[in-house]
Amino acid sequence: MPKETSKSPDEVVRELKNILAMAKKGPYFAVALAAKGTDDPSFLVDKVKKPDILAKKAKAEAGSNKLTYGNLEFEKGALTFYCQVDPPGSMMRGLKAYFKRYKVGAKFRFVSPDGTVEDDGEDDATGEIRKSFDTLMQGARQASASDPKRIKQLDGLRQLFDRAVEGDPPDVDGAKNLVAAVRKFAFTADDKGDGSTIKKNLIKSDNNWNKAIGAARKEVSKLEKEVKTACADLPGAARLDGAFKNLTSAIDSLEKALGGPLVAGTATDDPKVHDQAKKKAMGAVDQVQKVLGSSPLFKNLDDNPFIKVQATKLLTVTLASIKKDLAA
């Protein structure tokens, strides 16, 4: 790690892009520390050396004891730093400001030892696009596992998509076109012969599920805005961020639980895969319905004291429709 006290913005961006490229091949061990003589943190990244060993080296080179260390991964479209020790003092604020200042085409997320998630606060308009692409890609890869040619094609689409969303600024239109491409790629099988009805129902169900998830997220955002406005001056209001992040994560989990089986059955002509995907999707519907009916996060979500929403209702009604279509 260099010992100079300052770097040009171009040097910092190049260094961060290198770290981003490494993390995509990771995970890597990493140390972030507040070096003397500069407002910017310094990073030490290594594939083999464990974080505590890197921390000792970083302290010696930077002449600073203010550091955090852990695992560095590229996850869900963001460079994610899983901290094993809490960043001291105001270091977390410094890290967030640092990544907002130097843009390298990816979001940055920090996960503290207690599971608290912090990010750089940037919204590059690609969040929902990334989720759609990742869901489609996951199912397509599962269904194409035995076909090297299709896997190679999917890898090519992945590279093009990453290049689009990680640009500065991100190529949002290009990313949307690639979502359409991977969806078309997954649904190119000829719908003639055995299994075609099942496949069509899987495609229909996947589209309906994506729409319901998107609508539910909008309902939750509406509720979050109302709750934060009403509780802004109350003690403990800061904890609302964590509560709504937990709710958002729960919706993400429901999306994947059903989305994966639905998409997996659409990326092939094989009737056996269609039938297998249908069975898995039916089981996933039952699982998601059970969560919606029993989890405290969803049971009283719509009928809350602040503003009436329809997040749980939208998901529940859509699941009933999907279950009917899949059973046909």
Image (cartoon, rainbow, N blue to C red):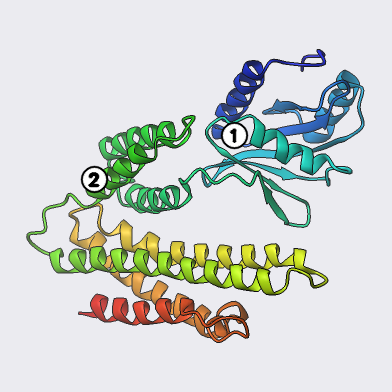
The relative height of residue 328 versus residue 238 in the rendered view (above or below) is below
Residue 135 lies, in percent from the top left, at 40, 54
Residue placed at 72% from the left, 73% from the top?
231
Residue 256 lies, in percent from the top left, at 45, 61
Picture quadrant where residue 87 is located:
top right
Picture quadrant where residue 279 is located:
bottom left
**Residue indicated by mark 2:** 185
Marks 1 and 2 in Cβ contact (< 8 Å): no
The type of residue carrying mark 2 is Phe
Residue 108 lies, in percent from the top left, at 62, 41
Q: Is residue 184 left or right of residue 114?
A: left
Does residue 28 appear anywhere in the picture? no
The type of residue carrying mark 1 is Gly
Residue 263 versus residue 3: which sits nearer the camera? 3
SS class, disc 1:
loop
Residue placed at 25% from the left, 66% from the top?
202
**Residue indicated by mark 1:** 26
